[in-house]
Image (tube, rainbow, N blue to C red):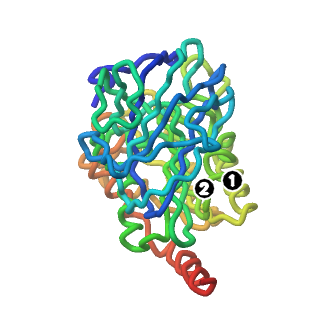
Amino acid sequence: MAPEEFDYYPGLERTFADVTLRQFVHTTLAGTSLRVLISNQYGSRPLRIGAASIARADHAGRLDPKTTRPLLFNAQPSISIPAGTALYSDTVQLSTAAHTLLAISVYLPDPTTGSTATVHEEGWLRGQLSQPGDFSSTAALPVAARLYSYFYVAAVDVIPPRAAQALVILGDSLSDGTGSTPWAQRSWPDRLAHRISAAFPGGLAVVNMAIGGNRLLHDSTGPNALSRADRDVFAVPGVHYVFVLEGINDIGGWPGHPDEDVSAAQLCAGLHQLLTAAHARGLRAIVGTLTPTEGCMDCGGTQGEAIRQSVNNWIRSSHEFDAVVDFDRVVRDPMHPRRLSAAFDSGDHLHLSDAGYAAMARALDLELFADSVNERQKATARHH
């Protein structure tokens, strides 16, 4: 769905005042309680939350009134979040199954003009902007506009009844889901989450920290992957596996910034740094090969293809990562291996279709996770 089909898709200077934002997330882990992280990381002035709530929701966006819980901050319903920071809500008692749709409603009483919003540009789940007023606990929001992006809601931490682990995916638009059917949860991490929850009920969460347009080595859409790994990966509660799929946007370069052109050696060094940081924290590091881009505009042409091939050869042969998932071989056209298979191409020769992302999700051998998940569950049983 194109941005113009949405009512609210402005630039980075977002203005909200006396309105309620209702935004939706899918859980990947069952739990008995949860908390929400509200971020003003990129704001230039304090962000005041007048009221907030969380509830289970249906696919029409209506709250289940019996599950609506107010979000409090240090037992208070309102809080001012300083610029450059993020704050957790108090823990809320709310049982959720894996793949539950949750609605987070945040009332913003004061104008946010002049403060660059903390935002995930491509939300892939349609949010709602209310008419003026606090409707944070209202079952059916009086909708003034639909939202294309996530604003301020940075994370929902589900607290399971027993110890669990997390697989965190660090990636770009290929992991964010660009090209898939909007609002249908058909990115490859979404598909993988369903496979994992079926195989390891309650044992492994899938946390998608991909940002469309993100790069490994230089800032673009969001901070580069190396600089954001501490916050977006290593600080995730329960993280045990790190999956990295980054580099395509580096190869394409950045218009007007020839100083940011990169070589295959630089990309390999960046991936090696992420691997080293993960292993230093006792985490398992998994990497995906870079998928084909022939026919894509701004993907580097012949020189870019040479870089992609070199990076993929290093990934396959380095034996440094705990596992390699060869997405390139899974989704390429066997007769024209520099191109995506026509059945997997969303149409821009870069991003994948629903079928392509499903093939990527199937490419992961779930045995990668079996030993540690089973061991964690055994340890929990012994503890109890």
Task: Give the total number of marks visible in the rendering.
Answer: 2
Per the image, the residue denoted by label 1 is 272
Foreground residue among 47 and 308: 47
Dot 2 or dot 1: first in sequence order is 1
Percent of width and height locating residue 206 = 48, 58
User: Is 64 left, or right, of 10 in this rendering?
Assistant: left
Marks 2 and 1 sit apart, C-alpha to C-alpha, by 11 Å
Foreground residue among 357 and 101: 101
Quadrant of the rendered image containing residue 189 = bottom left
With respect to residue 229, does 86 lie above or below? above
With respect to residue 180, does 150 lie above or below? above
At mark 1, the secondary structure is: helix
Residue 314 is tagged as 2
**Residue 264 in view of the camera:** no
Foreground residue among 158 and 223: 158
At mark 2, the secondary structure is: helix
The residue sitting at 63% across, 28% down in the picture is: 80
With respect to residue 163, does 281 lie above or below? above
Indicate the amino acid at tag 2.
Trp
Percent of width and height locating residue 20 = 41, 27
Indicate the amino acid at tag 1.
His
